[in-house]
Structures are given as C-alpha cells and as structure tokens.
Image (cartoon, rainbow, N blue to C red):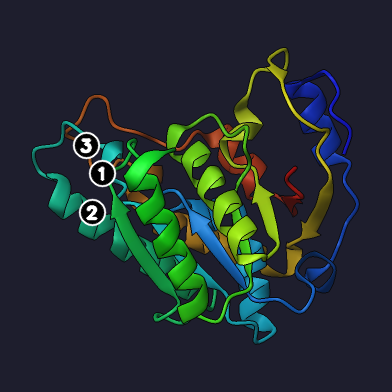
Amino acid sequence: MTAVPMTAGEAKRRMQELPLGDLATILGGRTPLVLAPHPDDESLGCGGLLAGCAASGRRAFVLVLTDGTGSHPNSRAWPPARLRALREAEAADAIAALGIAADRIGFLRLRDTAAPTAGPGFNAATAAIAAALRAHGCDMLLAPWRHDPHCDHAAAHLMAASVARDARVPHLAYPVWGWTLPDAMPLAGPVPAGWRLDVTPHLAAKRRAVAAHASQGTDLIADDPERFRLPAELLDRLCGRTETFLTPP
C-alpha cells in the first residue's frame, strides 16, 4: 500500500474496482467480531458478510460500541433510556434477519457521538473489545474505515486497530459514511486495498436487517425536528450487490 496524494473520489473509484473475493478469501478460516459504532452499522456495512457467516456455520459476533441515542436528541416521547432500548431491540431483530443467533451480539453502551479516541475511556473500551474477542471465540476484527466522516466511526477504527495490534489478529475495515465524502476532498494514507464481497445470495436478508432499524430509516420517531434519517442515496449504495472490506495500513 503506497502512500500517495488521493482524493475521496479516487478512493471511492478504487474501492469500486477492488477484486471480488469470497468469505474464504476475505476471512480465511477466522471468526470475525464486527465492531459497529452504532446499532445499524453492522447491517449497513457488513450485513451480507454476516448473513454469509451464518449460512456457512461461522459464528460471527457483533459488538455495538455506542448507545445510539444521538439520532433523536430532542424527542420527548423517546428520551435516551427508551431510545437506547429501542435501538438495541432493532439491532437484535436485524441480526436475527441475518441468521445470527441472539447470543452473538453485545452492547458497550458508550454515549453516542462521544466515543473516546484516547485516554482512560479509550483504554477501557479497547479492554472490553479484547475481552469480547476472547469470550466469543473471535480471531479477527472488522471495524469502520478510517476515513468514515463520523467521530464514533473514527473512534471505532482506532480502537479496532489498537486491539488487533495487541491481540495479533487481522483487522479489516468497512466503509459506511465514507461513500458520502465529497469527491474533491483530499485524503491521507495509502490507496485502498482489499476485496469486494458479492452479497447477492444474501441481499434480501441484508435489506430486511437494514429495515429492522426503523428508527433510522422511517418517521417512527416524529417529534424531533432535528431527527436523523438514513439518506436514500447511501442506502442504495450500501444495499447493492457488493460489500467492501479494506486492509488498513
């Protein structure tokens, strides 16, 4: 991976041209832990891969980093505790749609939009991720792309890189919000390398999983004028025929 000047448009083009690989190529014989910054990122970025793991008997585990309560900060009907419970229930329904057993998901419940990138909170989170790797028999980490433009995604990437280095396990990155970066935006780091996974056999399950996160894709919670809604263009990109998995620097 050569470090060269690159724009986001070039990075996205290169990601779209990555070679196709199957689960055996991308994961080898390993069992992945998918680190999701929020409830829904597991389905958006890795839903097809998770469904493929379930179909092939590979016991992937999903660990959700934050509580997801930042999506509707002004809702009176859905205060943080109730919203957190809803988002965790949606995540449980989503992994069921992918064929993942109910005991293969965990929640760290860090505050949405406040996942740490250094200090004691970061160290506690990485210790919890490492403990989950051991407890659930996982020997690979999947986490968001380093250029995903959300603070919790950036924190999840840093955490995964730290845990993977210390535990000596492979680390792959999946883009979610990185697909929305302005094409002219300059990016640091190496050119994207990795694979695309054809998720066509599991696309219907992935779309059901994404739809299970109704609080993020519909007007289920309508009393917050600043409420979050997943953009249709991003959903079209992420619910297409392939998912992208990158080898981080």
Residue highlighted by disc 2: 84
**Where is residue 192, by image quadrant?**
top right
**Rendered location of residue 209, percent (x, y):** 49, 62
| Amino acid type at mark 1 | Thr
The residue tagged with tag 3: helix, strand or loop?
Answer: loop
Q: Is 96 above or below relative to 239?
A: below
Q: Are marks 1 and 2 in contact (CB under 8 Å)?
A: yes
| Amino acid type at mark 3 | Ala
Q: Is residue 48 left or right of residue 123?
A: right
**Disc 3 crowd, CA 10 A, few/some/many (<14, 14-19, 20+):** some
**Rendered location of residue 155, percent (x, y):** 47, 41
The quadrant the C terminus occupies is: top right
Mark found first going from the N terminus, 1 or 2? 1
Q: Residue at x 79, y 60 (%)?
A: 198
Of all residues shown, which one is farthest toward the left? 76
**Labels in figure, total:** 3
Residue highlighted by disc 1: 69
Distance in Å between CA atoms under marks 1 and 3:
15 Å
